[in-house]
């Protein structure tokens, strides 16, 4: 398996610790890293992002093998691990850094994501309309080392900090 055979996907679905944990355990996902994306401050820190003034979302970037898992299957997991109908909030975590976003890397990912969102909205699985944004991936800033693989470091736990 070559690094060149892998594809990239980036998702924001609330606190990045739990999002990373869900994707890390998924067959076909080869690597994960948490970080910040979608804002206007270069090289933000966790403290910067927590002010809710930088515009960044806590996000997960995954490298995956498309021969083992499809982008559609990654989206299915994304939809299943959070509530995509709450704007700027997941559970008790409130702020724009916790918003639901799919950051696409290719036109194909954009089209697949839009179709997936529409189908889920049409299914009436959720009482409220899905507010997940679908935007082009911008610069991804990896989070500080202590955030990477956080649940593995602490042996599990709750995402709500």
Image (cartoon, rainbow, N blue to C red):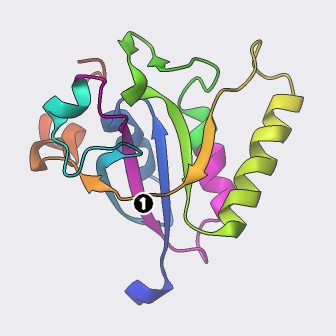
Residue 158 seen by the camera: yes
Residue 1, x across and y down, in percent:
43, 88
Where does label 1 land, which residue? Answer: 62
Residue at the spot 38% in from the left edge and 19% down from the top edge:
95
Place of residue 134 in the rendered image (x, y in percent of width and height, measured from the top left): 63, 45
Secondary structure category for the residue under label 1:
strand
Q: Is residue 12 left or right of residue 149?
A: right
- Using the rendered image of the protein, determine whether residue 155 is visible from the camera's viewpoint: no
Q: Which region of the structure is painted magenta? A: 51-77
Q: Nearer the viewer, residue 13 or 107?
A: 107
- Residue 6's place in the image compared with 159, above or below, is below
- Image position of 9 with respect to 21: above or below: below
Query: How many neighbours does mark 1 have within 10 angstroms: few (below 14), some (14-19), or many (20 or more)?
Result: many
Q: Which residue occupies 41% across, 90% down?
A: 2
Magenta-span inclusion, residue 59: yes
Tell me if 112 is positioned left or right of 158 in this view.
Answer: right
Quarter of the image for residue 153 reads top left
Residue 134 falls within the magenta-colored stretch:
no
């Amino acid at each position: 398996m070559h690094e060149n055979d892998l594809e990239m996907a980036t998702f924001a679905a609330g606190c990045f610790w739990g999002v990373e944990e869900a994707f890390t355990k998924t067959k076909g996902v080869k690597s994960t890293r948490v970080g910040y994306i979608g804002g206007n401050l270069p090289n933000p820190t966790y403290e910067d992002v927590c002010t809710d003034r930088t515009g960044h979302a806590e996000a997960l970037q995954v490298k995956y093998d498309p021969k083992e898992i499809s982008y559609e299957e990654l989206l299915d997991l994304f939809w299943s691990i959070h509530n995509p109908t709450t704007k700027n909030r997941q559970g008790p975590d409130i702020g724009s850094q916790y918003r639901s976003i799919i950051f696409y890397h290719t036109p194909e990912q954009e089209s697949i994501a839009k179709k997936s969102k529409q189908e889920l909205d049409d299914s009436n699985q959720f009482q409220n309309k899905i507010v997940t944004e679908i935007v082009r991936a911008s610069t991804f800033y990896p989070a500080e080392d202590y955030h990477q693989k956080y649940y593995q470091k602490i042996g599990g736990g709750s995402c709500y900090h």
